[in-house]
Image (cartoon, rainbow, N blue to C red):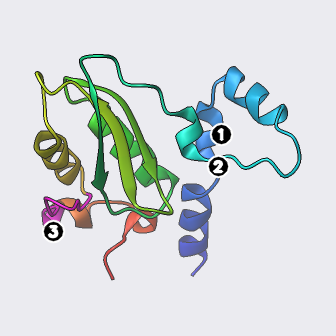
Amino acid sequence: MMLGVFLFTACNSGTSNKNQSESEHTEMNQMTPGESHSEMDHMTPAASNEEHAMLGVKGSCEMCKERIEKAAKNVEGVSFASWDMEKQELHMNLDPAKTNIEAVSKVIAEAGHDTDKDKAEQAVYDALPSCCKYRK
């Protein structure tokens, strides 16, 4: 039982705060009370040769977010990737001359996360940390 609590704490320890840039912290500090803030506020506009794409991706914690975004960004042609944990959606900018949403989906499934298009192999899913298990 204590191990489960420890792992849950480790996965949700706010590791994403470590990765925020100084400008993101400054921006957050400059928000006025009552002002809403969403993940999309940090989305970069697509370059003229890029298009915005969305893909449903399953996950459950900050470790999942890091893994999903890293997998997507490692695909040549993807310049931006941000996974919304609440909506279970990956937003990305990609160059359609270099890649497509199907290629990104396959890479994310290879990392252990089910997408709207591909399912992760059971052995890969089973190797994820316990806090990252999203299949019930």
Task: Provide the secondary structure element on which disc 2 rests.
Answer: loop
Read off the residue under disc 2: 14
The mark that comes first in sequence, 3 or 2, is 2
- Residue type, numbered disc 3: Gln
Mark 1 Cα shell of 10 Å, populated few (<14), some (14-19), many (≥20): few
Q: Which is nearer the eye, 112 or 53? A: 53
Circles 3, 2 touching at the beta carbon (< 8 Å): no
Q: Quadrant of residue 124?
A: bottom left
As measured in the structure, the alpha-carbon distance from the residue carrying label 3 to the one carrying label 1 is 31 Å
Could you tell me residue 118's position as x and y percent? 13, 59
Q: Is residue 88 above or below residue 26?
A: below
Task: Provide the secondary structure element on which disc 3 rests.
Answer: helix
Read off the residue under disc 1: 17
Mark 3 Cα shell of 10 Å, populated few (<14), some (14-19), many (≥20): few
As measured in the structure, the alpha-carbon distance from the residue carrying label 1 to the one carrying label 2 is 6 Å
Residue at x 31% of width, y 58% of height: 57
- Residue type, numbered disc 1: Asn
Q: Quadrant of residue 76?
A: top left
Asked whether residue 116 is drawn in magenta, I would say: yes
